[in-house]
Amino acid sequence: MKTVLVIGTMDTKADELRFAADLIRAAGVPVRLVDVSTAGTVTGPDVSAAEVAAHHPGGQAAVLGLGDRGQAVSGMALALSHWLLAQKDIGGVLGLGGSGNTALVTEGMRALPVTLPKLMVSTVASGNVAPYVGPTDIAMMYSVTDVAGLNAISRRVIGNAAHALAGMVKWPVPLAAQDRPGVGMTMFGVTTTCIDQLRAELAGEVEPYVFHATGTGGQSMEKLVEGGLLSAALDVTATEVPDLLMGGVFPCTADRYRVFARSQRPWIGSVGAVDMVNFGALETVPEKYRDRNLYVHNTQVTLMRTTADENRAIARFITDALNTCEGEVRLLLPLGGVSAIDAPGMPFHDPTADQALFDEIRATFRPGPKRHLIETDHHINAPAFAVELARHYRETIQ
């Protein structure tokens, strides 16, 4: 059986960390206690802070003995990421702590493969945990009380976490036999019809992994591509790009699409839902956008139609990244409309803005031996467009 790592700063959380480790050990699961303190001297860890710090690219001196606590914690987080990747027998990871420990330990957790059990007991787990979880499957548990001593509540909360992690390691879900290639697909509500038709078109040929294009959705897909868990992407939906450029709530990172340059995995995609920038409730739309074409999707989601100039910027962002790819790239343009509400009679129908998008892509996309721009007259949700996507996917894997 593989080993659980219990990680935290033992100069401040030793009792709590040992309590969790003892419970996991009592459950019959091997455990190692890993110290990531950046100051002080502690006794009893199975892995010392110095051993972890030595994995920093700059060595221990980049982590330990620094006068700046923030710099030391950042250095230890980087060192922990490198140390974790060097371990060969990790069954799962449990972290405990407040905001500092949470930032430090979850940075290490994010370096680990998706599906490897990761659980963080944290004082900040009831708020916005996106910066800690990122595109991974870290489970966050709110500690209720501070992780500052053992009491009737903290014992139960930490105990529940320890037993949950032990159970994940002791009784893993059996992996189903997979003889079909895993393919990532990006979807948004306004491109769901396309993805549903695409899945039906490729039924029996691929194992589809559908990702909601909410910023972290695209990051999750690309993390699996980078980890070799997906063989290709049918990256139909690009709405994360306008959110990055115009300040929406579902932004991608500046690195979007570039994993395909690094991995040379096949990329077949489109410009789905670039007609919109996503915001929260209507009152949250920035003042500078209040006079724009706004569509209230529901009480919590407001969409803003992109303009011709914004579409040109979106086009350049996408082509700049795809032009760096040496693997198979097929960018398909649905000239009939890029989303369910970009069609005649619908609120975001704007042929001028769409034409600006398509013209800028034509002007900036650089075709190559494996890099192709394909134009179709179809709407993105037309059955024929899904057929075209599937055809080009099949061609890239022949």
Image (cartoon, rainbow, N blue to C red):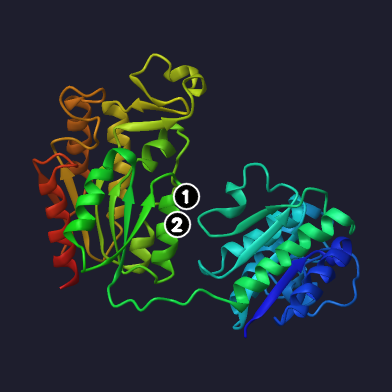
In front here: 265 or 45?
A: 45
Query: Where is 28 relative to 332, above or below?
Result: below
Estimate the spatial distance between the alpha carbons at disc 1 and disc 2, rounded to whole Å. 6 Å
Q: Residue at 64% of width from left, 55% of height from top?
A: 140
What residue did someone put label 2 on? 220
Q: Residue 313: image x %, image y %? A: 32, 36
* Residue 157 falls left or right of residue 55: right
**Residue 373: mark:** none
Residue type marked 1? Thr
* Residue 28 falls left or right of residue 290: right
Q: Residue 292: image x %, image y %? A: 36, 18
CB under 8 Å between discs 1 and 2: yes
What residue did someone put label 1 on? 216
**Dividing the image into 4 quarters, which one contains the N terminus?**
bottom right
Q: Which quadrant of the structure image shows residue 22?
A: bottom right
Q: Residue 281: image x %, image y %? A: 49, 25
Residue type marked 2? Ser
**Dividing the image into 4 quarters, which one contains the C terminus?**
bottom left
* Residue 34 falls left or right of residue 267: right
Q: Residue at 26% of width from left, 27% of height from top?
A: 308
Label 2 environment density (alpha carbons within 10 Å; few <14, some 14–19, many ≥20): many
For the view shown, which residue lies furthest in the bottom direction?
A: 1
Can the viewer see residue 125 in this picture?
yes
